[in-house]
Image (spheres, grey):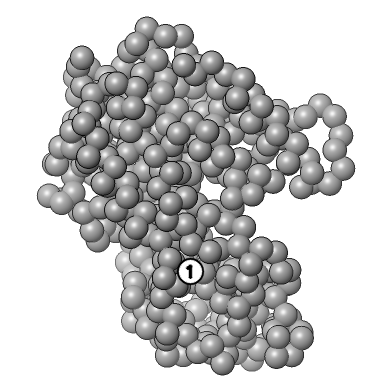
Amino acid sequence: MEQVQVIGAGLAGCEAAWQLAQRGIPVALWEMKPRKKTPAHHSDLFGELVCSNSLRSDQLENAVGLLKEELRRLNSLILRCADEHRVAAGGALAVDRLGFSQAITDAVRSHPLIQVKEGEVTQLPDEGQVIVATGPLTSDALAQAIAQRYPASGYLHFYDAAAPLVTFESVDMDSAYFASRYDKGTPDYINCPLSQEEYLAFWQALSQAREAPVHGFEDKNVFEGCMPVEVMARRGEQTLCFGPLKPRGLPDPKTGKEPYAVVQLRRDNEAGTIYNLVGFQTHLTWPEQKRVFSMIPALKNAEFVRYGVMHRNTYLDSPRLLDRYYRVKAEPRICFAGQVTGVEGYVESTASGCLAAMEMARRIQGKAPADFPQETAIGALALYISNESVANFQPMNVNFGIMPPLGYRVKGKRNKNAELSRRALEALDAMDLA
């Protein structure tokens, strides 16, 4: 049987390769590392760009929690590795980044039907079945080749940002405390309070801090889901207090009162030695990050093991290009998967790779499409990115708003969401995926 070419070994590419191989289909998985890396890459492991908190809520009252449960039931490699390397994070699925990436890499490289090929792919193959899962960091050469091949798709891009990491031992716990908002889940977050005077000094410094040069970057082009914290600060004195520094539900045990503002830190590895500044995606210069973020009292002596970085994300105008199976409508032997399709988020990327591979396997084996219904999270996401009525297409996280309403009233938002999840899982379990 001819190999399927999977281009890109991020979460979507690894998931796609795994799903194909598990169905007896040989795969050639192309990865440009270690021969070529982008500024965001630091190791040779697959899935290395996932932050400890990237996989988000694990609750079925949240759409991404539902999507994760669907992926578990579809025997997702990525979810299996995430569950095996999860760290405490209240109601969220957080992972030990190194253990998670290593597990994915080991599973993919050891699979007898997956051949990992190292090197940059600069052109789409002219024949054979192909899944392009190069993600938000598609190389310039391949991005240009895709744009030239499908000029009507309106190739687009936006900018994404990553938050800094600090060591736990460098956090001044005399100025911080463990708690989760409104005591939900377990108290896994380190909370760094600021008085009004401390906050205003921090806000002013952050608003005026020097940014690293990013070609073509403008505030209006920042994707709202990962807006740099300095851009948020410039939008108003109180903006941060209603965003990442929101103090609601986080009373300081020393005073029993809510601080004026709170910076939260979330565990980034299983050992709890490294923490992520929640909501502090940034593209400030590294010296400015050190200067400004050290103004937070609990971080006055913080050791930064990674500074925030800014990098380009690239995505397609998918409703004009792709169908519900992530296939190119005009060239169905080629599929796209991951954030390049406009699904926003690592779980969503994994889901696109899973669905694209499952459907490709069914076509190769002469089976009818599975047609995941819109009632499921994985189906709703695929139907959204292929919906031609979406005129001004923007990247989308999975959410209950893209699923059909229940058709009957349920009191309370959490109860309604739980009912939507119950309906989705029943629909998924009823499908014939053999």
Figure check: 194 above or below 44: below
Left or right of 379, for residue 305: left
Where is residue 423 shown, x and y percent of the image? 70, 29
**Secondary structure of residue under mark 1:** strand
Q: Is residue 23 visible?
A: yes
Q: Residues within 10 Å of mark 1 (few under 14, many from 20)?
A: many
Where is residue 96 shown, x and y percent of the image? 40, 61
Q: Nearer the viewer, residue 407 or 99?
A: 99
Figure check: 417 above or below 172: above
The quarter of the displayed image where residue 401 is located = top right
Q: Is residue 149 visible?
A: no
Q: Residue at x 45, y 22 (%)?
A: 325
Where is residue 337 shown, x and y percent of the image? 38, 33
Q: Residue at x 24, y 61 (%)?
A: 42
Name which residue type carries label 1.
Answer: Arg
Q: Which residue is mark 1?
A: 267
Where is residue 30 shown, x and y percent of the image? 20, 37
Figure check: 160 above or below 124: below
